[in-house]
């Protein structure tokens, strides 16, 4: 499986609940367990400004580039602005674009129905960016630790380049994917699905194609049932690619989440999403989004398990 990563994803945002050290921790965990080859990791280029402009307004991009955000805008973003912070996020957006191109390529090579493991049907076509998933970013503003909506930018790049017509977003971060839902509102070519904790940020939730808002304290069994019920509608939208926003923050020990998933529940979640895409013959792009466990090791282990599950399914 192609894995995109850069050491430069980790930028200095000061003491913050968003521990950017998780990216390197995931990489190290994957390499030390033989799940990724350090020499084969793909170093991305920063997203081109013209690519970012497929989603974001010129005025916003100018501010991300040169500064000039008002205090109220930075309060909404919940990140400090500096040229290096902005470049780190632009690089991660480039990483999601690179991973998306490679997932579509892998899908083309495997279809129709290239053989996977015996009895398991076709192998999963997938790639991953060990970062990204900034689903709270809107066209004209950033919020909730999200500067550029790399998920939306990658979809628009693939569409512009004629690599896909349709896409689906499976957003399983504990927080609703408000920016993504807003961006694709009224666009029948992109199906946006979010399964999240209802009573949590963002307090205003623009409607996506399918939103499943779960009660506080939802555990593994109820979560997996709700996810399993929803996934057929996602695949019925006949996407050419699925972007899986695999937030680690539904975890029971998360500081910003109020769901109660265990490691096993999160692994079950990954399995449901990835195996349903595999069964539908749709390539998947994995991005990380949130994860704020008290121990950064837990967040990293949850993200690494998503990659491991994709590899187990043949990616
Ligand atoms: Zn989140």
Image: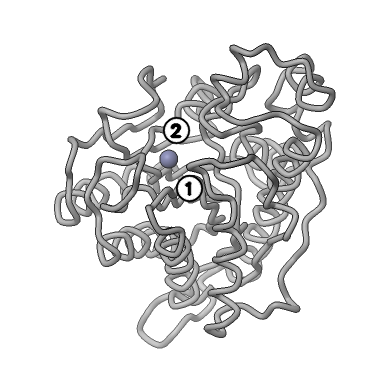
Q: Secondary structure at mark 2?
A: loop
**Which residue, given by chain and number where applicable, does mark 2 sit on?**
177
Question: Residue 295 at x, y = what percent?
Answer: 40, 59
**Which residue, given by chain and number where applicable, does mark 1 sit on?**
245
Q: CA distance from mark 2 to mark 1?
A: 9 Å
Q: Quadrant of the C terminus?
A: bottom right
Question: Residue 136 at x, y = what percent?
Answer: 52, 30
Question: Residue 308 at x, y = what percent?
Answer: 46, 73
Q: Quadrant of the N terminus?
A: bottom right
Q: Residues within 10 Å of mark 2 (few under 14, many from 20)?
A: many
Question: Residue 137, relative to residue 255: is it above or below?
Answer: above
Question: Residue 142, relative to residue 226: is it above or below?
Answer: above
Per the rendering, the mark at residue 18 is: none
Proximity of marks 2 and 1: CB atoms separated by less than 8 Å: yes
97, 257: nearer the viewer: 257
Residue at 33% x, 42% y is 233
Q: Earlier in the sequence, mark 2 or mark 1?
A: 2
Ligand 1 positioned in quadrant = top left
182, 190: nearer the viewer: 182
49, 240: nearer the viewer: 49
Residue at 79% x, 21% y is 67
């Amino acid at each position: 499986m192609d894995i995109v990563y850069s050491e430069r994803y980790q930028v200095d945002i000061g003491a913050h609940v968003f521990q950017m050290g998780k990216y390197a921790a995931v990489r190290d965990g994957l390499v030390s367990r033989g799940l990724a080859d350090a020499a084969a990791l793909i170093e991305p280029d920063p997203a081109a400004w013209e690519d970012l402009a497929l989603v974001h307004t010129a005025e916003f991009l100018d501010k991300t580039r040169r500064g000039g955000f008002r205090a109220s805008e930075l309060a909404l973003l919940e990140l400090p602005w500096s040229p290096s912070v902005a470049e780190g996020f632009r690089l991660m957006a480039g990483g999601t674009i690179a991973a998306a191109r490679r997932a579509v390529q892998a899908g083309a090579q495997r279809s129709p129905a290239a053989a996977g493991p015996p009895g398991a049907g076709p192998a999963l076509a997938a790639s991953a960016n060990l970062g990204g998933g900034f689903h709270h970013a809107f066209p004209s503003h950033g919020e909730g630790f999200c500067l550029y909506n790399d998920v939306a930018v990658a979809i628009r790049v693939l569409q512009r380049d004629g690599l896909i017509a349709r896409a689906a977003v499976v957003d399983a971060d504990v927080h609703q994917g408000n920016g993504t839902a807003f961006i694709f509102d009224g666009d029948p070519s992109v199906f946006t699905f979010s399964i999240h904790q209802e009573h949590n940020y963002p307090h205003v939730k623009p409607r996506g194609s399918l939103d499943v808002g779960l009660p506080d304290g939802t555990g593994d069994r109820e979560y997996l049932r709700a996810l399993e019920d929803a996934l057929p509608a996602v695949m019925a939208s006949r996407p050419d690619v699925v972007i899986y926003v695999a937030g680690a923050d539904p975890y029971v020990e998360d500081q910003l989440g109020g769901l109660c998933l265990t490691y096993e529940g999160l692994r079950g979640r990954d399995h449901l999403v990835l195996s349903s895409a595999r069964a539908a013959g749709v390539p998947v792009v994995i991005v990380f989004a949130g994860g704020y466990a008290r121990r950064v090791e837990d967040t990293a282990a949850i993200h690494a398990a998503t990659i491991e599950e994709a590899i187990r399914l043949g990616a």
